[in-house]
Amino acid sequence: MNFSIENYDRKYLDGMIELYNKETAFEPYIAPLNPNRFIELVEKKSYFDPTGLFIAIESGEIVGWIHACIAPGSERHHKPENKIPQIRMLIYRREKIKVGHALVSEANNWLKQSDQKKFLALHAQEGYPFYRGIWLGGEPMGMSAMPHVQLALEFGGYKNTQESIMMTAKIDQLPNIYNSEVNLEFITSSTNMAHSPMRESWIGFEPMTTTAVLKDETIGSIGWVIIPYLAERLGAPCLNIWSMGISEPYRQKGVATALVSYVMKTGYELNARFASVSTQLWNIPAQKTYAKLGFIPYQLTIGRTFECK
């Protein structure tokens, strides 16, 4: 091959960022990076390991990079002591298919040190240790709009095991508030971080939780965050909804719609003019709720799994 693969070093950072921004320029829901932003939001995390970040260089130019990690899960239900081998980023020039193949192969060889039998790639199952809030909101996954990345992962043995739908909406005027069938009180506070990896996954952002309370009982909640960096591409900050749950007895009673509309109003008051959310492809009730509030299907997002033989 006429390119070399090197480990991460800050001397490569300018070239990495230039490639990343060029390859994602078409996608307004991916925040652009700069060297300081990468250092603060990615490199400074305690579980960042530079030996798992590989860079492809051809004739002195960076033509691709891949970020593999063995990191803890980021969500409340994950056990922080469990370390998961996974790929969280793959960027390469679309015409350099062999570069993509080589980077995935390099990452796979590195991930084998975990002695685990399953690796994930841009998957939601074990959370989002890196690029949260930067890449497609609070739940970064692979993109149907970057088929060359999907091809490289498929060639490297990663099979499609999760599909979600990303939906987006404009909030260009004060949203209507929808009331539920029951009289609710909404309480908003900073998200309670269950463990250190969850806290680290949100470095650089201020995730919030709004709970729906009925007679002193919490019957639902929604997690959301304002992403200021997207203003550089969208023209205004974006509200991202990254979790929602309603207690079983109160489903189909308008509680979810009331919660989402309340949070959209809050986002508008915080200068967000766009909103995004991802739900699993099978979750039709959630999609109907978001559609009622002006969200439209935007693109498929994809998680992949590699099973060691």
Image: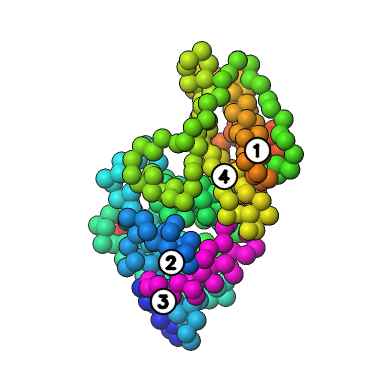
| Residue highlighted by disc 2 | 66
| Residue highlighted by disc 1 | 269
- Identify whether 303 is placed above or below 54: above
Q: Considering depth in this image, is 212 or 81 the residue closer to the camera?
A: 212
Looking at the rendered image, the disc whose residue lies closer to the viewer, 1 or 4, is: 1
For residue 101, say whether it is visible: no
Q: Residue 131, percent across and down? A: 47, 55
Q: CA distance from mark 1 to mark 2?
A: 38 Å
Q: Residues within 10 Å of mark 1 (few under 14, many from 20)?
A: few
Q: Which residues are drawn in magenta? A: 8-34
Q: Considering depth in this image, is 248 or 274 the residue closer to the camera?
A: 274
For residue 48, say whether it is visible: yes
What is the secondary structure assignment of the residue under circle 2? Answer: strand
The residue shown at (43%, 66%) is 66
Looking at the rendered image, the disc whose residue lies closer to the viewer, 1 or 2, is: 1
* In this rendering, position of residue 141 left or right of residue 276: left
The residue shown at (62%, 65%) is 25
Q: Residues within 10 Å of mark 4 (few under 14, many from 20)?
A: many
- Res. 11 mark: 3
The picture quadrant where one finds residue 76 is top left
Q: Is residue 17 magenta?
A: yes
The residue shown at (70%, 41%) is 171
Q: CA distance from mark 2 to mark 4?
A: 27 Å
Instruction: Please tell me which of labels 1 and 4 falls first in the chain.
Output: 4
What is the secondary structure assignment of the residue under circle 3? Answer: helix
- Name the residue at the right extreme: 173
